[in-house]
Image (cartoon, rainbow, N blue to C red):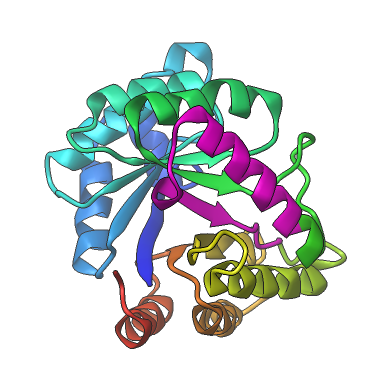
Amino acid sequence: MIIAADNLTGANPLVAEALRDLDPRPLQDLARGCAAAGAHLLDLNPGYLSRRQEDRLAFMVDAVQEVTGLPLILDSPNPKVLARGLTACRDKPILNAVTLEPEKLQEILPLAAAHQTQVVLLLLDEKSHPPPSLEGKVALAVELRERALAAGLSDDQLIFDPVLPNLRWPDAWPQTGAVFKTVRYLAAGDLFGVPARTLVGLSNLRSGLRDMYPVEIDITVLALLAGAGLTHVLADALNPALRDQAQLLAQIVGSD
């Protein structure tokens, strides 16, 4: 299982301030810390940006590449932000993410194909809603895969994210169960003839709710997903309890 650190996000006040002031040092300190904690990838997410700030992802890329050689995930819903981030990358990153939303299909998917990068296929429909059932998620995975292959990508460049819910959602636990089932089904390899790689944003579960729900929920969900065949997890690499569990699971199930 591959651990992708999600600590370099615009939702982090330290990162937001660094982006505002164009100060690379806080970003570099976080990147070093995530690398030391055993992260295999760094997810760079500047958050929602104005037109005047569309260079901020490229700034993040330049900053962290000065201090670490870890591979990068470029994470933004804005194709222009992703395109500028790509130009700063020394090595091919993973682009996060393509959904069935028309803008994503028309702009982010061709960008991934043109640069032949890996891409996360986020299982959201054209209205940015996650299907609540295994059947709906699998149908969406099939459609997004067909679109990606038609654009010129290959199966080994695709990573599927079945979308963990936030625990505020009224159907959060049934949706979490559907995510487990989807990961297991895709990992079995029967659908596409080869096992599909999968990713979840573990931090989604307790986002905004960390005073209400303990980290043990993340740990339990991660263990169940690892057992289902999850290949990538996007998580807080600097939380000691979560970091230790993720590293243990990576050793048990592998990180290839």
Q: Residue 172 falls in which quadrant of the image?
A: bottom right
Where in the figure is residue 167, as x and y percent of width and height? 74, 67
- The total number of labels drawn is 0
Q: Is the stretch drawn in magenta largely helix, strand or loop?
A: helix
Report the front residue among 33 and 92.
92
Residue at far front of view: 193
Residue 195 placement, left or right of 139? left
Where in the figure is residue 210, as x and y percent of width and height? 61, 69
Where in the figure is residue 19, as x and y percent of width and height? 37, 30
For residue 112, say whether it is visible: yes
Q: Residue 252 falls in which quadrant of the image?
A: bottom left
Quadrant in the picture for the C terminus: bottom left
Stretch of the chain drawn in magenta: 137-165
Report the front residue among 106 and 204.
106
Task: Name the residue rendered at 55%, 32% in the picture.
Answer: 150
For residue 21, say whether it is visible: no
Task: Name the residue rendered at 42%, 31% in the picture.
Answer: 112
